[in-house]
Image: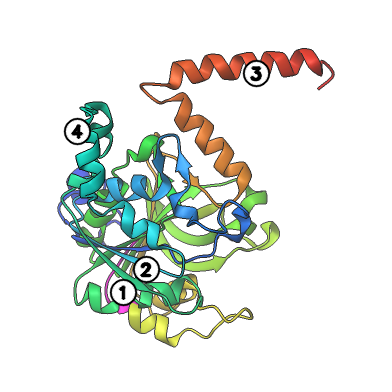
Amino acid sequence: MAPPICPQQPPCYVRKVIKSAIVPVAGYGTRLLPATKSQPKEMLPVARKPIVQYVVEELVANHVEQILFITGRSKGSIENHFDHDPELMRLLNAGNKQDLLDELKFEELQAHFFYTRQRFQKGLGDAVLCGENFAGEEPFVVALGDSILGLHGDSGTVARMAGLFESRHASCVIAVEEVPREETVHYGIVQVAGAEGDCARVVNVIEKPRPEQAPSNLAIAGRYVFSPLIFDMIRRVEPDPRGEIQLTDAIRLLCEEGRRVLALKLAPAEKRYDIGNFPSYFETFVEFALADPLYGERFREALERLLAKESAAHPAR
């Protein structure tokens, strides 16, 4: 009898530590204009932190030690954010602003940061290919810079994916979540076979299918673990009608060659916050702000007052 696709023993999720991650942040963020005209989408604040800080803190908590940002034009503020600012530190120390100094402790994260540019906007697959020399011959994580996993970025998914990658000798592990069928057009959707518990074998991946064409409602949740084999697959992908190299097409080639590609569902307590448009951004901001340990209760009271005032002004709504 063949071994199960996804062993149920928890240790299979934590054996492997993958030390490198690629974080693509080169996109224009056009769906969030005008907010993104002069600043990266990934630097928009969600409660008290920019989006990309949640992503980095999640990766470090999952044992990632070096992170490569795939950047583009007008993305310098990301590099500045994770750099040390001696002048700011002197100012805060001189003013004895310990509360604000505490907010900058993320600068002490035990990780090395690297940056390279994707010179032309040719899709997510091309962005990942920019990290080939960085990844070398070791497996690596890809974490989308505009997607937060778990409230306040509290997620152990990457560590679980790394363990599954190691224990099942996979070529690729994809984090997935269930989405409403009518929303499949916004995501990469996986077709699976042989599901066991929270994971399954992936047999196909389709980029943004219409609901009637979607093979499932399992959407890629912005986290991947790859073997270096993915770079060869990306080079074989033909550009789509917009001239972009889709990462999903490269994953499909892995499936077609019979490589082991696995999907792992997010834990029940986790949720993907995809900051791709204003409705999702507003909703994420409010949810994170309400859960803020310092200001959440005050914000809740203010929000309730505003909603009561709106209801009184427009009772028919």
* Kind of residue sitting beneath label 1: Gly
- Gap between marks 4 and 2 measured at Cα: 36 Å
Comes first in the chain, label 4 or label 2: 2
Q: Which residue is mark 4?
A: 94
Residue 70 tag number: 2
- Secondary structure of the residue carrying numbered label 2: strand
Residue contact between numbered discs 1 and 2, judged by CB atoms under 8 Å: yes
Image location of residue 316, percent across then percent down: 85, 19
- Gap between marks 1 and 2 measured at Cα: 8 Å
Image location of residue 155, percent across then percent down: 32, 41
Q: Which residue is mark 1?
A: 131
Residue 7 appears in the picture as rendered: no
Give the residue drawn at x 24%, y 56%.
Answer: 162
- Gap between marks 4 and 3 measured at Cα: 39 Å
Give the residue drawn at x 26%, y 27%.
Answer: 99
* Kind of residue sitting beneath label 2: Ile
Task: Assign the N terminus to one quadrant of the image.
Answer: bottom left
- Specify start and end residues of the magenta stretch as a single range: 224-230
Comes first in the chain, label 4 or label 1: 4
- Gap between marks 3 and 2 measured at Cα: 41 Å
- Secondary structure of the residue carrying numbered label 3: helix
The crowd level at tag 2 (other Cα within 10 Å; few <14, some 14-19, many 20+) is many
Comes first in the chain, label 3 or label 2: 2
Find out whether residue 277 is within the magenta segment. no
Residue 255 tag number: none
Comes first in the chain, label 4 or label 3: 4
Q: Which residue is mark 3?
A: 306
